Amino acid sequence: MDLVNSLSCDIKYRDFSRLRRVIAAVGYSKRRHILEIEFVNGAVYRYVDVPAAVYRDLMSAESTARFYDSNIRKHYRSVVVRPRHREQTEN
């Protein structure tokens, strides 16, 4: 999984690619309070100052995408680690 190689710190990752339609994988560093989310479109976003409780709630949410939209997106500072994949067009 590419997400694992995106940071050289103590982030633990869980792969959701077979189960989710929006979020492919989630990683969290308890020590640094960093949450990384890899989306099925290939984009990876890093969110900083995310409490462990928010990570736990995300992991146990019935819909991770809905939880992300309501509780993480636009609530925490973020950095684009990797932009989404662009679909290749044939010439």
Image (spheres, helix red, strand yellow):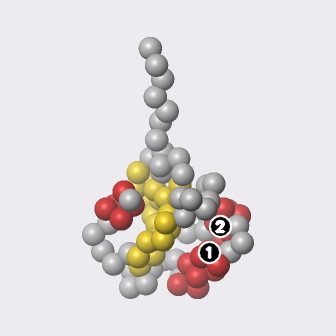
**Residue lying furthest front in this view?**
18
Quick check: 49 above or below 65?
Answer: below
Tell me if label 2 and label 1 are in contact, CB under 8 Å. Answer: yes
Mark 2 / mark 1, whichever is N-terminal: 1
Residue 52 spot, x, y in % from top left: 53, 84
- Determine crowd level at label 1: few under 14, some 14-19, many 20+ residues with C-alpha closer than 10 A: some
Q: Secondary structure at mark 1?
A: helix
Residue 60 visible in rendering: yes
Residue 48 visible in rendering: no
Quick check: 46 above or below 31?
Answer: above
In the figure, residue 53 lies in which quadrant?
bottom right
In the figure, residue 67 lies in which quadrant?
bottom right
**Residue shown at 48% from the left, 51% from the top:** 43
Using residue 34 as the reference point, say whether residue 73 is left or right of it.
right
Residue situated in front as seen by the camera: 22 or 72: 22
Residue 85 spot, x, y in % from top left: 46, 41
Work out which quarter of the rendered image holds the N terminus and state it: bottom left
**Residue shown at 43% from the left, 84% from the top:** 30
**Which label number is shown at residue 58?**
1
Q: Amino acid at mark 1?
A: Leu
**Residue shown at 54% from the left, 51% from the top:** 40
**Total numbered badges shown on the rendered structure:** 2
Residue labelled with disc 2: 64
Q: Amino acid at mark 2?
A: Thr
Residue 54 spot, x, y in % from top left: 59, 79
In the figure, residue 70 lies in which quadrant?
bottom right
